[in-house]
Image: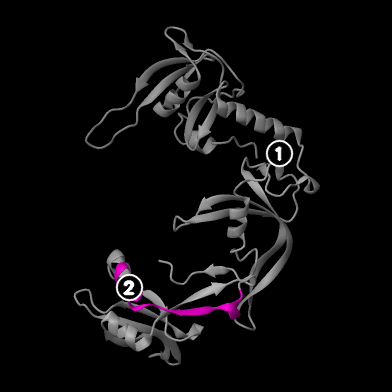
Amino acid sequence: MNKLRKEASWQSWRDEKIEPNDYDNEPLSGFVLNKKVGDYISDWNHRQAYVRVYDPRGFEFEITIENLLYILENANSIKGKGLEGEFVYGWDRKELVLIPTDSPDYQEINSFNKILHEKKYIKSKELVLGATYKTKDNQELIYMGRFDYWGTKWNRENDSYENVNKGKHYYFAKETTNYRKRPDLYIVNLKSLGDKIIECVSMECSERYADMFEMLEHKSYYSPYDESKDEYVYYEKNRFCEKVKTKIDKYYWHYSTSVYIENNENGNAEVCGADRNSELYQIRQSKRVPSRWGGYEQKKVALFSGSLEDIWERYKPRFRNKYLVNGKLYQNGDED
């Protein structure tokens, strides 16, 4: 062990002929802004502008312009005397930063560290529905309640996944957006609290609790997927044609649109462009066909080529909606 945080970063660029020194990262005054370096352009690179800062212990280092602006928002710089107040070092990803102790960020970090060192953790009997809590990872989450947590496991005998109840868990959440840029939940589920929850930020029930709980009810870990509730919905002709054309235009004919031509899993098929320079489209389906090396293999076989209107008339394409045991919609098969 005995590894310093970010050691890999500075070990990669330091001069190994110079022996490193260790300093305590405690509030310190006497920092002086020295001079700007970099910010030049050549025919092969551009170096970001940095500001050189003198540490009163006898060495210099560089900070970004963004860090300088942040410092000047929270401290004064006096010509000839340097920066007023005390500072500590920190990291913003790979960048070294200087943090004024009078800044809100430092106060928050200091308060957070104090709570961690006091080791006063929230117990289960203290939890309040809708209240906001802070984790030891410094996340603020809303307590949603204690519910069964559902997962899946592979059943070799049935050659399929089956639902598994993993017992009661404490659910904590915050609102976020998914890859479709739509409202979603970030969930932390805990079998036991242990030392994970360190502080109650607000005892008041969040005004977003009801909306968040509605989103939670659509999650398969809250209520498992129920295949028997699958719903096959026929596309309207205009919607089907628009969806296929939009996807092909967007992805330059590389991708297909999945549809169903029967009301079961085996009815899965795909619609794609028959040829880049043609107005024709194909509907294809995976079939088990004889292999040239013996036995059988899965291969995509064209069922029909024609216009999208012809495909819609002939095959009545549809999409599948999936539902949970609690009856809530889990997956909308018509989502783009």
Q: Quadrant of residue 274?
A: bottom left
Q: Residue at x 43, y 7 (%)?
A: 80
Q: Is residue 242 magenta?
A: yes
Frontmost residue, 240 versus 168: 240
Please, which residue is most extreme toward the top here?
80
Please, which residue is most extreme toward the left here?
277
Residue 130 locus on image (x, y percent):
67, 48
Frontmost residue, 247 versus 284: 247
The residue singled out by tag 2 in the image is 244
Label 1: few (<14), some or many (≥20) within 10 Å? some
Badge 2 marks a residue whose secondary structure is: helix
Q: Identity of the amino acid at label 1? A: Glu
Comes first in the chain, label 1 or label 2: 1
Residue 199, label in figure? 1
Q: Residue at x 34, y 88 (%)?
A: 314
**Range of residues picked out in magenta:** 226-246
Q: Residue at x 45, y 90 (%)?
A: 296
Q: Mark 1 and 2 residues: CB-CB less than 8 Å, in contact?
A: no
Q: Quadrant of residue 7?
A: top right
Q: Relative to residue 115, is residue 83 depicted above or below?
A: above
CA distance separating discs 1 and 2? 51 Å
- Identify the main secondary structure in magenta: helix
Q: Is residue 141 magenta?
A: no
Q: Quadrant of the N terminus?
A: top right
Residue 157 locus on image (x, y percent):
65, 83
Badge 1 marks a residue whose secondary structure is: strand
Q: Relative to residue 179, is residue 272 depicted above or below?
A: below
Q: Identity of the amino acid at label 2? A: Val
Residue 286 locus on image (x, y percent):
41, 84
State whether residue 11 appears in this view: no
